[in-house]
Amino acid sequence: MPERPVLRLLRRRLLQLIPLLIGVVVVNFCLIHAAPGSFLDVMTSDNQVTDPALIARLRTTYGLDDPLWLQLLKYIAAVAHLDLGFSYRQNMPVFDAILAHLPATLILMLSGLGLAVLVGVTAGIIAAVKINTIWDSIVSVLAVVFFATPSFWLGIMLTVLFAVKLRWLPVGDMTTLGADGGTFAQLLDVLRHLVLPALSLGLFYAAIYARVMRTSMLEVFRLDFVRTARAKGLSAVRVTLFHVLRNALLPVVTMLGLQMGTVLAGSVVIETVFAWPGIGTLLFDAVSTRDYPMVLGIMVLGSLMVVAANLAIDLCYLWLDPRIEVG
Amino acid sequence: MAMQPRFEMMRRFLRNRGAMMGSLILGAVVVIALLAPVVYPGDPLRIVGPAELWPFQDARFPFGTDALGRDIAAMLAHGARTTLLIGILASAASTVIGITVGAVAGYYGGWVDEAAMRGTELFQTIPNLIFILTIVVILGPSIAHIIVAIGVVSWTSIARLTRAEFLTLRNRDFVQACRAMGLGDGAIIVGEILPNALPPVIVLSSLIIAGAVLFESAVSFLGLGDPNVASWGKLIGDGRELIRTSWYVCTIPGLAIVVTVLSLNLIGDGLNDVLNPRLRDR
């Protein structure tokens, strides 16, 4: 009996994952060791430690006197056990610090992407159905403009308009300090804080999806099965929504998977604009204080997220179009 | 390439309205960048007037001044130099890396191809901007390092495209003929296959310039750029504190970025139509 495709896919991907993750760790490890000065130098000067005996002891504790390859092997072995090292800056294990900040970033990423798919796919459908009309032109122009707009600048401009001038929405942060009320009120509060960051992050991707969706809808419209469906007497709306849409979504799904890393990176920048308490805030603090274990940890976890997203996308493929061989 | 098709290409490019508009805008940006030292001699980052002067308030400062009293127009003009320099050189760097990896992978195939593609995948997996920020922080904030960082992160799409082109070209008759004539691998790759593989790669590297401009602006915005050089992203970053009173300090350089990236994208799309006719309507 043939193996189920889902299982085969999962096994293949997990086997590819291991060398990929080792690669990410090696690249970043080399990068960080190319830096002048170790994190220990920063740490000791921050805390004004000058006692050479203490510094020597710290070097031994952190394994800095080991040869580089041994340090690398030790790090890889530790990562395999989900131990990403200790952040002296946050004064807690890197893994715990990232885990504490991850939910905020995930909320921002998912709402930004959700918005992008919703707006982009809708705009793309409108442009394709109303091709060569004013609607098509409006969508095209907006898509070209938002594709050229830096998200952080869009964020600032939206803040000026909606938070500073109109005072409809809060300026930054994730919650209102000292806000009281039930769970519902708190949820609403977070949502109000989420609108502007999600828009800033999402509109760039909405622009991409609108263009991709328009093209792919037009391609699918030309296919035989659409003509058959119309000939069967199905209405134009029904054919568009149920037959064309499902097939035309495939390229958008592909892009979603490819872009997971850029979305994570984009939310890092957006977070600094809106003081959103996620990975971005953590990363920014880590790079400016040379907290290398933290930087490395964020890269490793970020890459892991990308791989996981791609796996999820492959599973989506199986569902959207069972004919596709994924592997 | 014969003259006739080249004229045909020119004609098609000139007929493409978006591409023409993009070329005009980009031309203007290039002129501004070139003339910056003439029109605004001296350090654009020096203080020249009262702080937070709004645009059009004083004829000497058409775009106003920032929180310190620096001329925004002067910083914009000099910033155009930084932006174009980093955009073009970073794109060139990533094109060179990408073509090298892609050509070797596509030409030799087998385990070389496998290894090169796994490497490419690796660089695609690391979240791009996070990677750039880390490289810049480690190497130190300078224009050269920003170029290196963007180049290291942006080459993967070029490598994939070059590889695909090489895969379709490497067994063509003219390549076989070159091998039969005893031409070395290097000569065949550089002299015979590469010129045929270049047109789509050129399109992609023109689009990478646009991406590089956006990356640079983000790096400078976050305060990790060269502190002694005027840059549009840095101007936005410096103006952030003023959004309650003088939001124009952020708005103006942002518009400059949007217009420049827009024009680069329009040109890239136009080139795509001209050089890759089979990809048209995509």
Image: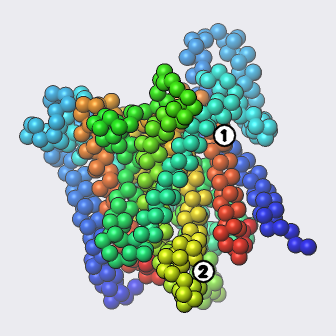
Q: Specify the amino acid type for callout 1.
A: Phe
Q: Distance between the Cα atoms at labels 2 and 1? A: 37 Å
Q: Which residue is mark 1?
A: A29
Q: Are marks 2 and 1 in contact (CB under 8 Å)?
A: no
Q: Residue furthest right?
A: A1
Residue at the image position 59 percent from the left and 64 percent from the top: A254
| Res A312 quadrant in image | bottom right
The image quadrant where one finds the N terminus of chain B is bottom left
Frontmost residue, A252 versus A72: A252
For mark 1, does the 10 Å Cα neighbourhood hold few (<14), some (14 to 19), or many (20 or more) residues?
A: some
Residue A248 visible to an observer of this rendering: no
User: As displayed, is residue B152 above or below residue B186?
Assistant: above
Expressed as whole percent of the image width and height from the top left, the position of residue B72 reads: 22, 39
**Chain assignment, label 1:** A
Chain to which the residue tagged by mark 2 belongs: B
What x and y, as percent, mark residue B218?
A: 42, 44
In the image, B219: left or right of A2? left
Query: Do the dots labelled 2 and 1 sit on one chain?
Result: no
Q: Residue furthest top?
A: A51
Q: Is residue A270 left or right of residue B173?
A: left
Residue at 24 percent of width and 39 percent of height: B248
Q: Position of residue A101 (x, y in %)?
A: 60, 33
Residue B241 picture quarter: top left
Assign a secondary structure to mark 2.
Answer: helix
Residue name at image x 16 percent, y 47 percent:
B38
Which residue is tagged 2?
B168
A277 or B260: which is nearer to us?
A277
Q: Is residue A129 visible?
A: yes
Looking at the picture, does residue A267 appear above or below residue A315? above
Q: Secondary structure at mark 1?
A: helix
